[in-house]
Image (spheres, coloured by chain):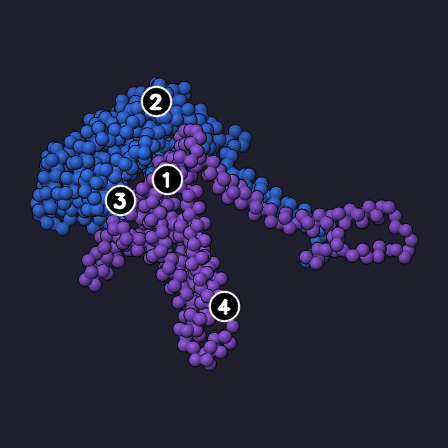
Amino acid sequence: MQNLLRPGWRAAIAAAGAGVLLAATACGGGSGEADGEVTLVVDTFGVFGYEELYQRFEEENPGVTIEERNITDLADYTPQLQQNIAAGSGAGDVVAVEEGILVQFLQQADRFVDLNEHGGAELEANFLPWKWEQGHTTDGRLIGLGTDIGSMAMCYNVELFRDAGLPTDREEVGELWPTWEDFIETGQQFQEADTGASFVSTIFPYFNVLKAQEGDHTYQNTEGELVIETNPAVRGSWETVTSMAEAGLSANLPLWSDEWNAGIQNNTFATLPCPAWMLGHIESTAGDAGNGRWDVAAVPGGGGNWGGSFLSVPTQSEHPELAAELAILLSSPEGQLAAWNAANNLPSSEEAIDSADVQEFTRPYFNDAPVGQIYGASARELEPVYFGPDNQAIDDAFRAALESVEQGQASPDEGWQRAAEEAERAAGEG
Amino acid sequence: MTTLDRGGPGAPPGPPPGAGRGRPTTGDDARERRRALAGRLDAKGSPYLFIAPFFLLFGVFGLFPLLYTVWVSLHEWSLIGGNEGFVGLDNYVRLATDGKFWNALYNTIGIFAIAVVPQLLMALLLADLLNRRLRWSGFFRIGLILPYVTSIAAVAIVFGQLFGPQFGMVNYLLELAGVDPVDWRGEKYASWVAIAVMIDWRWTGYNALIYLAAMQAVPRDVYEAAAIDGASRLRQFWQITIPLLRPTIIFTVIIATIGQMQLFTEPAVFGTDGAMNGGTQSQFQTVMMLVYQEAFRYGNYGYGSAIAWMLFLLIVLFSLLNVLVTSRIRSAT
């Protein structure tokens, strides 16, 4: 060994090796830009359906390339985005922000470009008033442009309704349950028919719908204070859905779990609150065998919303001008319609909702239900709901508590107690 | 080391080159001195340079975050607001009275106990079986390590489905056998068992191979002598194999302790909500999951760091305790 290299050389090589490793660790990051070529990165979750719009933007702006980074699951997407925003690097030039997390970002408005300065101020007519308001901070900065909204309807399993001797026509089904009391009564009828299935999969999604119907805020008020004990919307919704569990309507399948998906495939439950984006999930989960099995009716209590997003431009973007331009194009009525046609994301623009593309749209998989019309009508009745900065984390706590109640591990009171304690931790008051 | 000593200070001064043929020039002298110096530097410095890359990387990605966590844990620190002021040991005081922390610690140690003890015993047994003359022993040995090669997330997903309360295969089989189905996620101890099965499926073979390697180093004639003296196989196992494997057993116990105290992926994927809650009532939330939940779900970096540091101290303590227990195995020497 000692004859292979002279001593000095060995030391030099060792030093060089160390240097290379160091250099390697120092690299990473940095965006590709050469000779006026610009790459815009768009961060999205789920399905946004923007491919055609990207092409158009690239054609109109030579030298610009758009790269979409998509993460399917919102639960994975949000923490990553939060960290990138907090760290001041790593986020895309345009980022999709789900409504549940938007308020937290409104509180760090200085990390986002004020789109008013890029021609955003004239766009008010492009959005439903509440969606337009939601994207603003209290001092009037515009940091989020609306894309889609969830709106709300009730999906029901036609086969199971027939087996239980209930009506199957979507108009008649809607008339079964003008209120939630009626809905629970229908559920008891359904259970008595003993089809072997349950009326609801799990009570948590119903809690979401009720909460949004009953008040203008949920766990936290607009000052960011925890108000679960005093807000009747939260307590009332809790009591309604736990009474569903006590009436034995639930199949106790945790939302989004493999068991829950298996429940869709095996006809284990008869109803499911259906925001527009849920249709795609049912279709892809139930597959060909489920064609025509599900239909869409009105939701008890009328209206409601679950989900929906915004587009923002972080100040860390190196091309805020271009990025704002892109965000404005993607969120324009035209852009929203393109997303509707590609992925059935319900537009938040009145103009787009009223267009023939939406109003005349029927979805064959759901017995040709006129879903555009159903969701469009529900969207107009929407009252905006304010979600506090810790909404997501508190929601997780309530979800766990509701599941523990429906699975018989805790009484409704014990569950409430637990959720309240956990909510205090999540809100930083524990 | 001896090869490096040639130019070193301890090298015997040999006759200078060309001593018999007249005085060396001063240039030669200088070159000679430089070479000697380079040699000395090389001998002293090179080893450090060669190990430097590891320590530099460890310093940047290991030591610095470790110490920085201490700093963060002494502050009120949130995801959005960043450093919100020094609070001294407040986070640690809160920890001591936090029911969720004690629950998570109880879960972690409980799962450790029902996972690791059977795991190491099974591994010893399997290794002993494979150490005998077997047909296709190579095949069996590879078979043992296969679960270890599988992605941990894939394991957790598959087992999560097997242990599904309504459509899971385990409950299906239980029902065939006439046993009531078990709520594998809802009931605390049932969930521990499900997670322990997952862990053991993955790690038993790994530990068995380590034991097997150690067993193969035990000379055959020791066993032969014992057999001639009339010792049964069981007695040979307890009085020859186990004592000779003592250092290996201690090693596996420490590694398993460190790994299991930081248990995260299996229970995290076993939970269905992605919120790191570890079941509806935190039945199987481990300490690492609590760290994640506090820091990344609730944005309390300060408190999360305090929990992480407490866990570090507990691991040290627990490892020492385990070594103390394991070292009661009678040594062979």
Q: Nearer the viewer, mark 1 or mark 2?
A: 1
The mark lying in front, picked from 3 and 1, is 1
Label 3 SS? loop
User: Could you tell me if residue A116 is visible in this image?
Assistant: yes
Q: For mark 3, what is the residue?
A: B280
Real-space Cα distance between discs 4 and 2? Answer: 73 Å
Image quarter where the N terminus of chain B lies is bottom right
Q: Are marks 4 and 1 on the same chain?
A: yes
Residue at coordinates 44% horizontally, 67% vertically from top-left? B242
Q: Which mark is residue B332?
A: 4
Amino acid tagged 1 = Leu
Q: Are marks 4 and 2 in contact (CB under 8 Å)?
A: no
Q: Quadrant of residue A334?
A: top left
Check chain identity for marks 3 and 1: say if they share one: yes
Q: Chain of mark 1?
A: B
- Kindly identify which numbered label has been placed on residue B95: 1
* Coordinates of residue A79 in the picture (x, y in percent): 38, 37
Q: Residue at x 56, y 47 (%)?
A: B54
Q: CA distance from mark 4 to mark 3?
A: 49 Å
